[in-house]
Image (tube, rainbow, N blue to C red):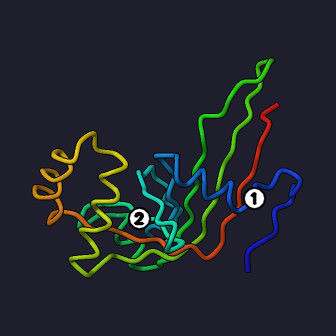
């Protein structure tokens, strides 16, 4: 179902992929948008390692949510800032995740994921508690269950 990586000498191990998902903060999410048009957008996310999944939050209505409800298959790409080694070129790591997205319906699970998400991005517990009290009812938490994942070390030269 998923194509093998063409340049597999650059492949990251599964643990390297998971480490990148643990540490990076932003990704590009791709869905099948209106009338089959691709729709890709930036999202913040949190890796749910024990569930082989990740989650993010979004508004209760909009293009992204409509697309995922219509076709839950998504692709999410994460990459690091890279580093320059010697010359002008960069060494960059990236991970591509294919999975199925679903809105988290259970209120307790929704709050638990929101707290994990907030712990990654919010500077203090107090601010996290305030934000959850203020905004959790106005957003959706979307969980992507990973079906396939690859990672690649790239030397951009």
Relative vertical location of residue 138 with respect to residue 125 in this rendering, above or below: below
* Residue 83 position within the rendered picture, expressed as x and y whole percent measured from the top left: 68, 29
- Foreground residue, 57 or 36? 57
Taking the image as shown, residue 85 lies to the left or right of residue 108, namely right
Marks 2 and 1, the one that precedes in the sequence: 1
- Foreground residue, 142 or 19? 19
* Residue 151 position within the rendered picture, expressed as x and y whole percent measured from the top left: 71, 56
Taking the image as shown, residue 50 lies to the left or right of residue 104, namely right
* Residue 152 position within the rendered picture, expressed as x and y whole percent measured from the top left: 75, 51
Quadrant of res 82: top right
Residue at x-position 64% and y-position 59%: 96
SS state under label 2: strand
SS state under label 1: loop
Q: Residue under label 2, please give it.
A: 55
Q: Residue under label 1, please give it.
A: 13
Q: Quadrant of the N terminus?
A: bottom right
Residue at x-position 76% and y-position 46%: 153
Q: Dot 2, how many residues are within 10 Å of its Cα: few (below 14), some (14-19), or many (20+)?
A: many
Residue at x-position 66% and y-position 66%: 149
- Marks 2/1: CA–CA distance: 22 Å
Residue at x-position 76% and y-position 19%: 88
Q: Quadrant of the C terminus?
A: top right
Relative vertical location of residue 83 with respect to residue 99 in this rendering, above or below: above
* Residue 55 position within the rendered picture, expressed as x and y whole percent measured from the top left: 41, 64
Counting every numbered tag in the picture gives 2
């Amino acid at each position: 179902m998923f194509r093998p990586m063409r340049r597999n000498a650059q492949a990251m191990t599964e643990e390297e992929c998971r480490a990148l998902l643990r540490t990076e903060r932003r990704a590009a999410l791709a869905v099948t948008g209106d009338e089959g048009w691709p729709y890709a957008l930036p999202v913040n996310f949190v890796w749910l390692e024990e569930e082989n999944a990740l989650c993010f939050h979004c508004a209760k209505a909009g293009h992204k949510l409509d697309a995922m409800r219509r076709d839950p298959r998504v692709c999410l790409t994460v990459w690091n800032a890279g580093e320059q080694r010697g010359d002008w070129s960069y060494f960059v790591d990236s991970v591509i995740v294919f999975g199925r997205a679903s809105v988290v319906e259970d209120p307790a699970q929704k709050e638990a994921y929101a707290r994990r998400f907030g712990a990654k991005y919010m500077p203090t517990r107090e601010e996290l508690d305030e934000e959850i009290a203020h905004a959790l009812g106005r957003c959706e938490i979307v969980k992507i269950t990973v079906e396939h994942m690859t990672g690649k070390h790239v030397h951009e030269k």
